[in-house]
Structure formats: structure tokens, C-alpha cells
Image: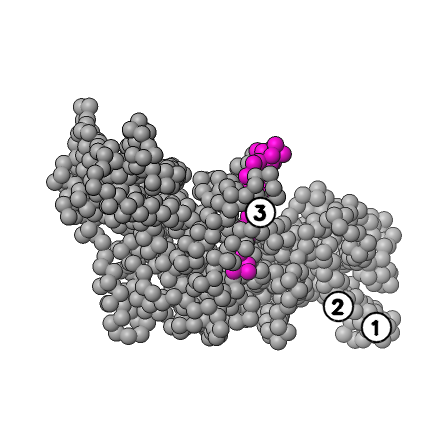
Amino acid sequence: MLAEVLLLLSGHQSSLFVPHSSTLVVSPHLTEYLHPGEITSLNALADLSSKYRKIKSWATETQKKGREAILLESVNSTSRKGKQREIPSTSNEKLPNQYLTTLSSSILNILREYEVQIVEIESKILSLDPELVQDGEGRGYVPLSNLVANFDKWKIPLASLSTLMDELISGDGDGKSMIHVPGKLIDLVESKLRTGNPKLHKIYSDIISSLLHLFLIHLISFMLYGITTTLSSGTINSIGIDVGSDPSSPRYRIYKLNDNLLPSSIDGKTKESILYIGRVSATLKRENRDLPKSLVEGIKDEIMGVKGLDELSGFGEGIQRARAGIGEWLWTHILTGPQIIESIESLSDYFLTRKADDSLSLLAEIDKLRVTKLILSNPNSSSSVIREQDLDLAMLRSSLGTTVENDRYLEKLRWKMDHGPLRAIPTSNTDKNIKSGAEDNENSQSHIHRLFSSTLFGTPLTLTTSITWPLDLFLSPKSLAIYSDIHSYLIALRYTHMKITNTWSILSSKAKADARQQHKHELQRKLDKSCWNLTRQINWLISELLSHFMGIMEVQHRHLLVKLDIQEKTNNYKEGSLGRSTSKSSLRGSTIGRRSSVGPFPSKGKDAGQIQIPKSPLSESHTNWEERTTKSNKAPPTPNKAEKNYLDFLTLRSIHSQHLSFLLEALLLSDASVSSLIKEILDVCRRFASLVERWNGDSIGSEQNTDEFEMIKRIEAVKEIDETLHDQILDLFTILLDSQNPSPSTNNEGDKSSLEVGGGGKSFSRTSKFNHISKMMSRQPSFTGIGSRSKIGGGGTKENTFGSTVVEVGLERHIEQLLLKLDFNGMLTRWKEDEWMGENNETGYQSVLAQGGL
């Protein structure tokens, strides 16, 4: 009987006990011969044996299937190739994952102590140990109560483990329970760890330690080695999941954390840091790069040494220190400050046309190429074709004699013709390709590209550049597309300005020739006067727009580097590199910082204008407000590990995107209707320049070559262009003015706008106009004063003056500054008054200065 009980406790079956509900009880045939106390003791031992057998059988079966699943997955992963590797095997859908396998192994290790105790009890019985055997009359009697007392310490642990098994088995039945998910499994074990029973606490401590060790291994493999998976496997788990290519940068991948593996005790900040570190490692892995071994070993030892995942265990602090260390290494070895300065400077010089001499030389060279290839050459020859290579060579030729003559960045610039080579006489196949290409790209291109990219040749032409790793970590294709769009816009403005300058030269040459004539026909005088006044008006408009836009971009460029804390005070980036200009730019139309939120150029989101600038590990110094940013050959300083904010490449990409977004608004490109209006204005200006160029000066007022009827036609053409331009400038002024004038119903009585809608007309009094202009002028910051105040006190302690005063006062005023520059003599206001009062819109062909009383 005693041997039967010991075998029962070891998990063997016995005919003396029968199943009853979820446990075992003494057989009814045996109870007739037993004392009630003995029955109670045997039932207690049988129940203990039943729980042990259930736990042991589940753990053994789970461990066996888990090992088979791991071997099967390893074989499949080495045999499958390509897309087959992403197809999970249906045979291992219900196989246990690594965490369940680890759990079963831990439980089996715990049960070995129980099995050892059974062997010890049997040894004591055989040796007649007096602690267990009562040697009454030499018969070696063993009371069942002694056996129950010896195994009583396993009653609560086995009952708790049995309950855990019930939860796991019940979750395995429908296949939909989340209990088998590693993160939920760890949470479940952690919840059971909170107990007052010392034995139970030790058991679950051992289990959670094994699960935590496995979790940390998976965490280290993703964080430090960049190991991710796209498999939906139930056996091989990875904390990092490769979602797919990044839409904004297709060369790189998007990674996210596997929420199924993350316990709930990990907070959001720690998760974000884990994802950041893993993304860096995975990106380096794809580029065949690795983190330094010493850094990896130090982080690994610290992470693997934690005792838990809660706040008290120091896990979160360890992850933050790891992020600081990797961020420091990233900034000092991969994405360094000089690289960022060089790329931002180069993009600004060429795409934002900050190098005016090179831009003008390029336009002249392209215009010469257009005349040579499309006008003067034989249209049926192969030389009457403009290809991308011709434009690239023209760009290199135009750089000779300019400040960018020795700049190596020119080699990275390329022209792209969306519709292929341009011919003097397009073929039918070319027309079909253009139509099909236009339909394909219509939805993918921005309205800026569609409006301004065809200015030079009438076909889309885009300036592009090649960005290599690691600069493409923050310069995404979308950002480069914005640079290309802005370049097309600025090139359209500069090209129009160049054409008007040529018109001025033509008119000047004609005026010198006419000065020798004593008599001049009245129609000649009228035509000359019309052309001169229209030329002055166009030249004034384009010059004001260009100066305002270039001032904004210049100051925004400096402010971008200030936000990145990577400005240097040296005058050369590196020895032998292209020297950057230190000339001061006009600050009259400058603005820095937040995006504007006025009128037709709204900022998206309530807090879109608030820029949170993390502390940069590249902080060293700032240039004075009056000084031009230059490149430096200094190595960037390393970040302070104690800092809690880090400027990683994702933050850098965000800051750079905000910079480009503000530029789009400041250049009046964020609103498609305003961009279209500016496009129409530029088209009208170039149309007039083309007319004068076609007349070539000698026919503008020459009685020898032009009859009176032809001169009248030309006067009418100039007058029609003048009226069209008048209406378009007035429309632009109205849009800009409305963006600064809120609706009268939304203001207080004292702040009501002078615009009053009533009856059938509107009124705009001269007094209210002066009040409005005075308001605008009173709100303008004195940039000279700000610049001088920023120098007071020497060091960088005056950054608050620079940051707060200029950002808060000057940022949202770029529209008002443009209005002041356009309407400095009240001409546009008088046009607006004439329109509202129903008076004649005729400008009288007076110059801008004459209309201003100067």
C-alpha cells in the first residue's frame, strides 16, 4: 500500500484510486476497509498527485512540441527562398512559441524538487528514519499523516501551477485567446508573483526570471544587432517588425515594435527609445555597418543585468543610457555635424538660388542653349535636340567664373526632363509619350511642379541631386522634391527678371538711337512711354518679390542651423573647400521660426507653429545675427549623456520638414490659387518681354519699318498687357491684404476693419488705409536693433532675446512686410480705392516714383 502511494505521488496510475471530477479519490471498494482519517489523508495525496501529473504532462508535451517547432522553423528558414520565406507553414500554427517552451522548461525544473523529495521520502522509509517511521514493535509503521505533512508545502504551489495550466489550456482550446502571447504571458506570471507565500513567490520568481532572460535576448537582438522579421511565425519571435519600405524614403524600411512581445510594465518612453535604437541598428545592418563592439558589449551587460521591467528595476534608465550612447556614436561617426552643414548649405545655394551669380549665369547659358538648339539649328538634324546631358554640361559651363566654380557639389546635380528630350519639331511618338507621361505624373506631382517646371522650355524640367547614406536618413525624397519645386519657382522668377532686364537694355539702346533724331512721331512717343512704364512696373514687382523671398530664405537658413545648434564661427568649412559668402542680406523682409497662420496660407493643426527643439549633441557655438553661416572643419562635440533630449536623425528630419513647410508658405506656394496667380503674372511679364524682343528695338517706334496701323496695334498690345497685369497685381494685393484683415464681425468695435460691406458697394477711406499701414509698421520689429541687442553681453546667454523676440514678433509678419514693400508709396491702395469706388483703373502710365510724389 505504501509503495502504491509513492508511485501515485510520482505520477503513476493506480487501481486503488479513481478519477473524480478534476482530481483522484480513493476507490469506493477500498474505503470500506479504511478509517475516515486515512481516507482523508489518501484523498489529499491523490489530489496532489493529480495536479502534479497534469502539470508534468502539459510541461513535457509543450517542451517537446516547442523544440520540434524550433527545429522545423530553422529547417524551413534555410530551405525557403525569396517570397516563399514570408509564407508561414500551416503545420506549426498551433505549435507553442519560445516563451511557452521556456515556461514549460522552468516548470519542469521546479517539479524536479518535488520528485527529489519523493525519492528522499522513500529513502527515509527504507532506512526507517525515526522522523518518518514509527518503529512500533519493529514493524516500521508509517502514518499517512506524516506523508501528508511532508508534502503539505507543495499543496499551494501545485494548486497555483495547476490553475496556471488551466488558464493556458483553456486559451489553447479556441486558439483566439491572447494568453499565449509572450507579453500577456509575462504579465500573467508577474501578476501571480505578487503573493505572500514564500514558496510560491520563489517558484514564480524562477519562472519570470527565465521568461525575462528570453525577452531580453530578443530585445538585445533587435536593439543592438538589428534583427527583425517579416514572418508571422509562432515560434521565432522578434521584437522588431519590418513593416515595409518607407514611402518618404523607399530605400529604407519602416520598423515597429511587436506589441505581442512587450509586457505592459514597459512605459511609452522606453518603447520609443527601444524602437529608435533598433531602427538605427537595423539601418546600419542594411548598410553593412555595425555598432562598435565595445559599445554593444557595455549596453548588453547593462540590459541583461536588470532584474525586472518595472520602474524600480532600472530597466527604463538603462534603455535611456543606451540611447544616449548610441546617439553619441551616431552623431560622431555616422551623421556628423559637418556633413549636415555641407548638405544644407549646398541645397540652399543651388536649389534656393542663394548663389545669385551662378543662377544668372545658368539662366543665360540655358537661354543660349535654347536659341542654339531649337531656333538656329536645322530642325531635321540630330543637333536640334536638347537632352539632359546638354543641360548638365550647360550647368557646368555656367559655373565658370562664378563663386561655385570649384564646388564639388556640382557633380551631384542633375537635370531631369520628365517628357524626354526636347526637339525643335516634335514627332508623333514624342507627343504620345508626353501625353501618357503627363497622365501618369499628374496625380503624383505637386501643383508647384505643374505650374513652374515648364518655364524655361515649355516642358517639365527639374533639378535633382543624388543623396547618399547617411544623409538620406534625414533628407527624404519628399524633401528633395520640395527643394526642386522651390527651385523651379525661383528660377521662373529669376528668368522673368532676366527677360525684363534684357527688355530694359533693348529700350535703352533704342532711346540712345532716338536721341539723335530731331523729330519723332506722336505714336512713337506714346509707344515708347508705354513700354518704358510697363517695363519699370514689371521690374519693380519682380525685384520686390525676389528681394523679399531671398531675405526670408537667408534668415530661415540661419535660423535652421540655430535650431540644430551646429553653427560655427569659422569662415571656412574645411581647407580647400568652397568658401561661403559672408555678405549680409537684407533683413527687411525676413522672418524666422514658426509657420505663419494667416489668410490663405494656414498652418495645419493647432500647435503646428510651436517647434519643440531638442537639445543637440552638436551644440558648440552660435554665430552673431549679423554674420553669415559658414562651414567648419571642427569635429562636432559629443553630447552630454546626462541630457534627456537627443537630436537624432528623425528629429532632424522633422525640423528640416518644418523649415521647408515654412518656406513654402513664406514664398506664397502653400496655396494653389496664389501660386497660379503668380504664374499668370510671370507669364504676362514674359509675354511683354518676348514682344519687345521680337520687335528688337528698331521697330518699336521706327517710321521706316513700321506703318501707323502697325504702331497702333503694338500700342494696343502693350495697353492690353498693362491692364491685365494691373488686374493681376491688384488681385494678388487683395489676397495678401485679406489675409491680414479678419472679418469685421469677428473683431471688437474698436478694432473693426475699415472694409464695410453695404448696399451695393464698398468703401475704403484714405484715413483707414493709413491707419492700417501704420498698424502694420508699428508691429514690425527693428531687426537692426535686435541684431545689435543680441550682441550685447557677448556670449550665448542672449539667445533668449534672439529666440523669443524675433520668433514671437517677426515670424507671422512676412505677409505684412511684403505688403509694405509692394505698397510703400500707396499705389496699390489707390488702385484698390479706384476699384471699390468704381473709378477708372487707368494707371496713367506714370512711374512708381512719380505716383508716389517723388
Residue 632 as seen in the image, left or right of residue 811: right
Residue for point 66% across, 45% down: 177
> Residue 192 or 809: which is nearer the viewer?
809
| The quadrant where residue 261 appears | bottom right
In three-dimensional space, the C-alpha distance between marks 3 and 2, rounded to whole angstroms, equals 82 Å
Query: What percent of the width, then of the height, locates residue 719?
Result: 28, 32
Query: What percent of the width, then of the height, locates residue 720?
Result: 30, 31
Label at residue 123: 1
Magenta region:
410-436
Label at residue 113: 2
The mark lying in front, picked from 3 and 2, is: 3
| Mark 2 burial class by Cα count in 10 Å: few <14, some 14-19, many 20+ | few
Label at residue 433: none
Which amino acid is tagged 3? Arg
Label at residue 387: 3
Q: Secondary structure at mark 3?
A: loop
Residue for point 38% across, 48% down: 498
